Amino acid sequence: MRSLVVDDDLVSRRVVVELLRPYGVSEQAVSGREAISLFIAAHDQKQPFDLVMLDIQMPNLDGQETLAAMRAVENQRGIAPQMSVKIIMTTVNVDRASIDAAFKNQCEAYLIKPITRESLMINLEKFSLVPWNRQNKQL
């Protein structure tokens, strides 16, 4: 699984990258602009990401704007919804308007920080990105 972890907070990025490490390669971005550049480059190289973990609160270009831009790139390239990247929004705030906006912009899930292994794995399994045994909490 190829993933892109986008967060302006170093500790948050490292936690998510470490949780994803057993399942494949993760690239990191500290801003929405950097994330969009990496996202486009991955498509140009015919190696698109399977997963984007996207923080909502970032300076300049926030997660909502970044999400909308990523979906616009997929739309412009004619990528069918069932083939699009799975985007999980992450945040420390439980704000109904923010959650609604994220789903309106077509994210697949919304996780509240701190991200736990279990909450992440449940979503990755739901999206068929990794096999995971909930009872044993391992592969």
Image (tube, helix red, strand yellow):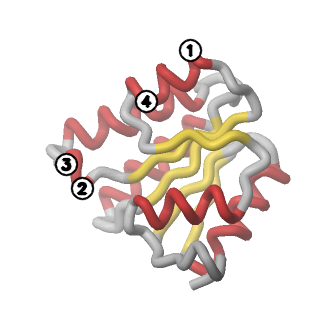
Mark 1 or 2: the one toward you: 1
Residue at the image position 36 percent from the left and 61 percent from the top: 48
Q: Which residue is mark 4?
A: 103
- Image height of 87 relative to 49, above or below: above
Q: Position of residue 107 (x, y in %)?
A: 43, 38
Hey, what amino acid is under mark 3?
A: Ile
Q: Are circles 3 and 2 on residues that touch, CB within 8 Å?
A: yes
Q: Could you say which is closer to the camera, residue 25 or residue 41?
A: 25
Q: Amino acid at mark 4?
A: Phe
Which is in the foreground here, disc 4 or disc 3? Answer: 4
Note whether 94 is above or below 86 in the view shown: above
Work out whether residue 137 or residue 28 is closer to the camera in this orientation and state it. Answer: 137
Mark 1 lies on residue: 97
Residue at mark 1 to residue at mark 2: CA–CA distance: 27 Å
Q: In the displayed image of the protein, which residue is found farthest to the right?
A: 11
The secondary element bearing badge 2 is classed as helix
Residue type beneath disc 2? Met
CA distance for labels 1 and 4:
10 Å
